[in-house]
């Protein structure tokens, strides 16, 4: 570990007062040591990682970390703060701050060493020695493992737990666990260490599979088979989760595994005693979006209902979008070739002339319409999948198809997906004999759930939802004047607030839902949504062009790419700028998006394609006014971000504050 940290990378009097300033102060030491090539680019990556989940841990520890292309060699910097810095831990500020920098292609050996440090942070003697050290070289040696912490040999968590573990003649309760975090460097291994130590203290045999950056070694199938329960402490999707089928499951975020392992073990034992074997998903290993839990993780048990609901809906929308893009663009292309009346053409299966453009237009239209026909079933099916995994796919798709049959449309698909997921989750909680578990996910659950969801959609909720869908359509058709402008403002704000996140997806899904049965009002909504979504990357591209000095070299490079991304309606092109300076960038682009959305609605612009950016302008109603709306919003957002960034001023640092860094001088920056 000698090449990872040196005395020059240790600051025992860290004077920063915020986590951003602390990261900058430590990162500047890395730059001075020629370990980081671009300070601002690296800090943007640190901020992006921090935005996924706070990196503060109980016990006064902060571990900001990331992988970055701006890191030339795996590096660790350590700072000790007398006042403490808030890194989002439940028990208060952190006084021990470790900034971990890993190259984008870091090798396993270095990551293994970093994971070893993460495990040592669970040792109170190690952290006590770090707090007591007064020599940077000695502290660096301690972190490298060259100097043992006082009495550390006999008091590590696992060693202490081994002494405290009761001797039992009976076979111990066995738990298998999986830990993972987005970066796979620190939290993954700290949670593993914490669970292992807590298990030894409780007389429970805990075997942990760390799905981190330093390697992924699968648990022995025999160990899984012998386990009495499973704990998932994760912030990214567990890999190959079907291996744990038929076991009681505790599903939480990774920080819960670090902060309250004994509670998780106790909960696992309770579930095993109650025989809740169906709590583990019965399906395959496909991806699913994670939800942020109470401990910052994706576990279903730790997440609030609102967070889980958002995750379920986003799962459905994310699978629906490819159908929207393919089907919508095919339909738009057919209109460009054959005109809008091509939608009434005869089936190309019965009538197709190779040499006629109208036949080709009709072919494209009918293929696109077929793809569009899957929108509601796919939405419903994958909402259900996000809730209860693969067994919920069949009832979800069935419910979505019924929603189309009863004219419940997009809203019906949402309700059908939620109903299907809820029904399957309820069935999975019913204890069944071991001989039936194998057929539950492929026969019993789809059969019963499809019947229940079909009954509810046909008889109970389908007609009321259809009436609501019809009322919504009539309202959109009747929009005019100030009402339309207000809706455009709201949609513009939603599209630009999180740039590809939940609010953005909700606004986009609302617009796309109207294209399934297009009306003048729904086409105006689609136009406003796409126009507003183009503003953030276009504004940042323009800002980096007109005021280069306000942006780093990396941001200027991203700005060149943002021209193409914005023109293509890829709002995520502005995310790097928002991550680096959210307080200035996000309000600016929201204002621009609101202007564009309002103008698009006021101009009466319409759009039949769900995607494509400027490449589908010929298919837009009032195309010149549409481009004017986009240009106006882009100029507003650009002017605001340039104004706010240009108004930043640096507060001078008094000469007697010898420990102050350039980062601390920026803490007082105001807009």
Image (tube, grey):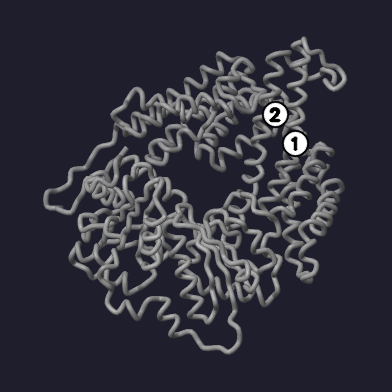
> Measured from the top left, where is residue 434 in percent x and y?
77, 71
Residue at 81% over, 18% down: 344
Mark 1: few/some/many CA within 10 Å (<14, 14-19, 20+): many
Image quarter of the N terminus = bottom left
Q: What residue would you read off at disc 2? A: 327
Label 1: which residue?
A: 374
User: How many numbered circles are shown?
Assistant: 2
Q: Are the residues flagged by discs 1 and 2 in contact, CB closer than 8 Å?
A: yes
Does residue 83 lie above or below 75 as drawn? below
Residue 134: percent from the left, percent from the top? 18, 67
Q: Residue at x 65, y 41 (%)?
A: 319
- 342 to the left or right of 508: right
Whole-percent x, y for residue 445 in the image = 79, 58
> Image quadrant for the C terminus?
top left
Q: Quadrant of residue 325?
A: top right
**Residue drawn at (79%, 56%), measured in percent from left and top?**
442
Q: Does residue 400 appear to the left or right of 651 in the view shown? A: right
Residue that sits furthest to the left in the current view: 656
Label 1 element class: loop
Q: Is residue 614 above or below residue 57?
A: above
Question: Foreground: 377 or 371?
Answer: 371
Q: Residues within 10 Å of mark 2 (few under 14, many from 20)?
A: many
Marks 1 and 2, the one that precedes in the sequence: 2
Tell me where residue 284 appears, x and y as whole percent: 68, 54
Q: Residue 568: which quarter of the image?
A: top right
**Of residues 218 and 393, which is closer to you in this image?**
218
Give whichever of 472, 345 is nearer the camera.
Answer: 345
Looking at the image, residue 110 sits to the left or right of residue 629; the answer is: left
Can you say whether 517 is above or below 175 in the image? above
Between residue 582 and residue 636, name the one nearer to us. Answer: 582
| Callout 2: SS | helix
């Amino acid at each position: 570990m000698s090449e990872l940290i040196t005395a020059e990378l240790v600051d025992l009097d860290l004077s920063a007062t915020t986590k951003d300033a602390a990261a900058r102060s430590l990162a500047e030491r890395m730059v001075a040591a020629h370990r980081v090539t671009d300070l601002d680019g690296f800090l943007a990556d640190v901020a992006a990682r921090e935005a996924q989940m706070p990196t503060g841990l109980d016990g006064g520890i902060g571990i900001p970390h990331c992988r970055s292309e701006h890191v030339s060699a795996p590096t660790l910097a350590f700072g000790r703060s007398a006042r403490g810095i808030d890194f989002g831990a439940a028990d208060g500020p952190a006084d021990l701050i470790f900034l971990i920098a890993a190259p984008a292609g870091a090798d396993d050996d270095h990551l293994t060493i970093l994971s070893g440090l993460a495990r040592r942070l669970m040792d109170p003697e190690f952290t006590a020695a770090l707090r007591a050290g007064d020599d940077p070289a000695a502290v660096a040696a301690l972190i490298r493992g060259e100097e043992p912490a006082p009495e550390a040999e006999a008091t590590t968590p696992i060693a202490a737990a081994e002494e405290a573990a009761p001797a039992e003649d009976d076979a111990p309760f066995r738990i298998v666990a999986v830990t993972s975090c987005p970066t796979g460097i620190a939290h993954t291994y700290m949670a593993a260490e914490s669970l292992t130590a807590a298990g030894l203290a409780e007389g429970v045999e805990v075997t942990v599979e760390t799905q981190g950056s330093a390697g992924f070694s699968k648990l022995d199938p025999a160990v899984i088979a012998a386990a009495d329960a499973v704990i998932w402490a994760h912030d990214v999707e567990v890999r190959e989760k079907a291996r744990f089928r038929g076991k009681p499951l505790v599903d939480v975020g990774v920080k819960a595994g670090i902060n309250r392992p004994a509670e998780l073990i106790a909960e696992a034992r309770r579930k095993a005693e109650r025989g809740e074997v169906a709590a583990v998903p019965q399906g395959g290993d496909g991806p699913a979006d994670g939800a942020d839990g109470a401990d910052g993780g994706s576990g279903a048990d730790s997440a609030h209902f609102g967070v889980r609901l958002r995750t379920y809906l986003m799962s459905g929308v994310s699978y629906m979008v490819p159908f929207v893009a393919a089907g919508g663009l095919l339909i738009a292309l057919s209109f460009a070739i054959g005109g809008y009346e091509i939608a009434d053409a005869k089936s190309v299966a019965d009538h197709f002339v190779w040499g006629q453009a109208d036949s080709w237009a009709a072919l494209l239209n009918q293929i696109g319409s077929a793809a569009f026909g899957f929108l509601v079933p796919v939405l419903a099916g994958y909402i259900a999948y996000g809730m209860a995994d693969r067994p919920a796919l069949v009832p979800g798709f069935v419910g979505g198809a019924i929603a189309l049959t009863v004219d419940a449309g997009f809203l019906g698909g949402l309700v059908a997906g939620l109903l299907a997921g809820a029904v399957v989750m309820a069935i999975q909680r019913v204890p069944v004999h071991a001989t039936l578990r194998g057929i539950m996910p492929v026969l019993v659950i789809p059969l019963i759930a499809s019947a229940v969801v079909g009954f509810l959609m046909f008889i109970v909720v389908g007609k009321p939802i259809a009436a609501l869908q019809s009322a919504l359509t009539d309202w959109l058709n009747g929009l005019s004047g100030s009402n339309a402008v207000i809706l455009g403002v709201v949609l513009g704000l939603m599209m630009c607030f999180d740039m590809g996140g939940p609010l953005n997806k909700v606004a986009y899904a609302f617009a796309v839902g109207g294209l399934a049965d297009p009306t003048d009002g729904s086409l105006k909504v689609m136009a406003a949504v796409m126009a507003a979504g183009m503003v953030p990357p276009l504004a940042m591209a323009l800002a980096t062009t007109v005021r280069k000095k306000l942006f780093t070299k990396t941001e200027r490079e991203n700005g060149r790419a943002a021209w193409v991304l914005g023109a293509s309606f890829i709002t995520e092109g502005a995310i790097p700028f928002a991550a680096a300076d959210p307080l200035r960038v996000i309000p600016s682009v929201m204002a621009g998006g609101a202007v564009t959305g309002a103008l698009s609605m006021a101009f009466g612009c319409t759009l039949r394609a769900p995607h494509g950016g400027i490449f589908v302008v010929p298919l837009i109603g009032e195309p010149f006014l549409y481009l004017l709306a986009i240009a106006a919003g882009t100029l507003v957002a650009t002017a605001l971000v340039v104004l706010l960034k240009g108004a930043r001023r640096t507060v001078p640092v008094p000469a007697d504050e010898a420990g102050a860094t350039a980062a601390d001088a920026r803490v007082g920056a105001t807009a």
